[in-house]
Image (tube, grey):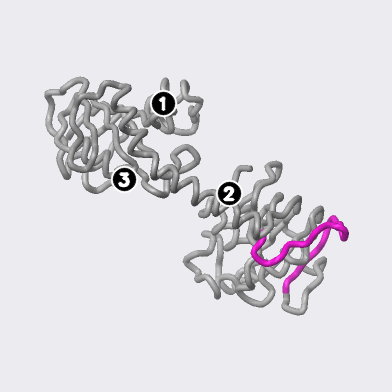
Amino acid sequence: MKKISRMTLTVLACATLMTACNNNQFKKTENGLLYRFETTNAEGRQPQMGEMLIGEMTIKLDTVVLISNVGHPDRIMQVRPDMFKGDINEGLQMMHIGDKAIFSIPADSLAQFIGDHRMPPNYKRGVNQMFYYEIALSDIVSVEELQQEQANLEEETAKRHEEEPALLAQYIKDNNITVKPTASGLYIVVKKKGNGPKVSEGKTVAIDYTGRLLDGTIFDSSREADAREAGKYNPNRPYEPLEYKVGAFPLIPGWDEGVNGQTEGTELTLIMPSKLGYGERGAGNDILPYSPLVFDLTIVSVK
């Protein structure tokens, strides 16, 4: 099952959801949480502390939708200890699988706990804004299941770490790479040498790129043809060379090392161990922890 990222979970925990309703329609718990159940299933299991909820959720600040996964049930929130009296965690534990409910809390209460700087842009202190959470609960992941998932992930990650050197060595052999790696372990294969100015700190460069895993899977590209071939085409992004100022733009170490000193017009391939890429954390759904990477680059301009 697809999981919401940690960053998204943080947003979910720091906001609230629903369609705007008159607070007079809500009941109130002893701790001050406003709630209303639209669908009830008293026979369904209730969430316990530490468990993960699966379902649909929309979060609003007054009438402004902050986040919603309606139509795409997913992991939406983990039950945690209350941050303050009447917070959303009290409401989560009131639900049953099959329930649909709306919970509301004062925006100022949350802001007092997490700080105004972490609140949505449309938040204004002292004007009685309300967060609304509209939740349809379809399933629950138990603490034991979560712990087993974590154990499996740690085991898989350790296995990938152990296997990485052999996989990289096999790739070098299978692709007849004859250049020697740099001291860091980076392989720089120059396919065509350009004769323009050199890449150096402070200069602005434009680089066309395609990033692949060792099995050939494309995870990102500035080239539309490659993106379409990989099924990664996104009509909302421009397909053009990446332009940035060297030394002032955060890039993975292998890219920085491989591009530095190259000349405009150069075409090259960088083959890098994971420590020069995304390391033990990986990136997104495609780049798992301890994934060696291959980048095909063209240095379009150096200014």
Q: Is residue 71 magenta?
A: no
Q: Which residue position is annotated with label 1?
A: 216
Q: Front-most of 284 and 189?
A: 189
In this rendering, does residue 291 appear at all? yes
Q: Is residue 39 magenta?
A: yes
For residue 89, what is the image quadrant?
bottom right
Q: In x, y percent, where is residue 155? A: 50, 49
Name the image quarter holding the C terminus. top left
Dot placed on the residue nearer the N-terminal end, 1 or 2: 2
Labelled pair 1, 2 in contact (Cβ < 8 Å): no
Numbered disc in front, either 1 or 2: 1
Crowdedness near tag 2: few (<14), some (14–19) or many (≥20) residues, C-alpha within 10 Å: few
Residue at x-position 60% and y-position 73%: 83
Residue at x-position 15% and y-position 29%: 263
- Residue placed furthest toward the bottom: 30
Q: In x, y percent, where is residue 211? A: 37, 31
Crowdedness near tag 1: few (<14), some (14–19) or many (≥20) residues, C-alpha within 10 Å: few
Q: Which residue position is annotated with label 2?
A: 4
Dot placed on the residue nearer the N-terminal end, 2 or 3: 2
Q: Amino acid at mark 1?
A: Gly
Q: In x, y percent, where is residue 188? A: 22, 31
Numbered disc in front, either 2 or 3: 3
Secondary structure of residue under mark 2: loop
Q: Which residue position is annotated with label 3?
A: 275
In this picture, is 227 found above or below 88? Answer: above
